[in-house]
C-alpha cells in the first residue's frame, strides 16, 4: 500500500506537490489528469472550480496567492502550480 506523506514544509518536493495536485484534481473531477495537461483548455473547470483550486492550493501548501500571482498562467498546468507553490514557499522562507 502506498501512502502520500502530507508534508507541507520545505521537505515536500516538486514530485510530492505534483502528486498531491493530481490527486486533488482526480478526486474533485472523477477523471484522470496528466501532469502537463492544460487544465483550462480541457473545459472541465468552471470559474467556481478555479476558486476551489486556489483555496486548495493555499490550504494544502500553506501559501498565500495574491496580486500578480493570481494569473491564469500560474494555474494552467500542474507544473505551473507547482512552480508557483515552490516560489511562494521560498519567498515565505526568505521573509521570515
Image (cartoon, rainbow, N blue to C red):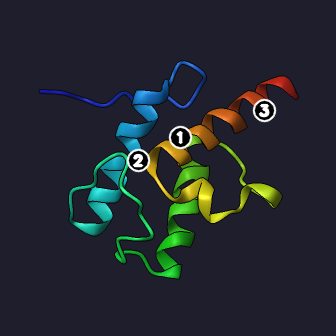
Question: Which residue sits furthest right?
Answer: 95
Image vertical order of residue 20 relative to residue 28, above or below: above
Quadrant of residue 94 in the image? top right
Residue density around tag 2, few if under 14, some if 14–19, many if 20 or more, within 10 Å: many
Dot placed on the residue nearer the N-terminal end, 1 or 3: 1
**Circle 2: element type:** helix
Q: Which residue is mark 1?
A: 82
Residue 92: image x %, image y %? 78, 32
Query: As drawn, is 15 to the left or to the right of 89?
Result: left
Query: Distance from label 3 to label 2 (Cα)?
Result: 20 Å
Q: Is residue 83 above or below residue 16?
A: below
CA gap between label 1 and label 3 equals 15 Å
Question: 4 left or right of 95?
Answer: left
- Taking 42 as reference, is 38 above or below it? above
The quarter of the displayed image where residue 95 is located = top right
* Circle 1 SS class: helix
Q: Residue at x 24, y 29 (%)?
A: 3
- Identify the image quadrant of the C terminus: top right
Mark 2 lies on residue: 21
Q: x, y (%) of residue 65?
A: 71, 54
27 relative position to 70: left or right: left
Q: Which is closer to the viewer, label 2 or label 1?
A: 1
Q: Position of residue 77 (x, y in %)?
A: 46, 53
N-term-proximal mark, 2 vs 1: 2
Which residue position holds label 3?
Answer: 92
Q: Residue at x 61, y 65 (%)?
A: 72
Provide the secondary structure element on which disc 3 rests: helix
**Label whose residue precedes the other's in the sequence (3 or 2):** 2
Amino acid at each position: 500500500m502506498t501512502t502520500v506523506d502530507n508534508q507541507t514544509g520545505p521537505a515536500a518536493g516538486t514530485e510530492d506537490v505534483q502528486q498531491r495536485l493530481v490527486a486533488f484534481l482526480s478526486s474533485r473531477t472523477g477523471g484522470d489528469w496528466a501532469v502537463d495537461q492544460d487544465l483550462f483548455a480541457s473545459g472541465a473547470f468552471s470559474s467556481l472550480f478555479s476558486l476551489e483550486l486556489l483555496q486548495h492550493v493555499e490550504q494544502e501548501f500553506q501559501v498565500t496567492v495574491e496580486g500578480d500571482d493570481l494569473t491564469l498562467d500560474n494555474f494552467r498546468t500542474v507544473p505551473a502550480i507547482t512552480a508557483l507553490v515552490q516560489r511562494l514557499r521560498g519567498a515565505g522562507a526568505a521573509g521570515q
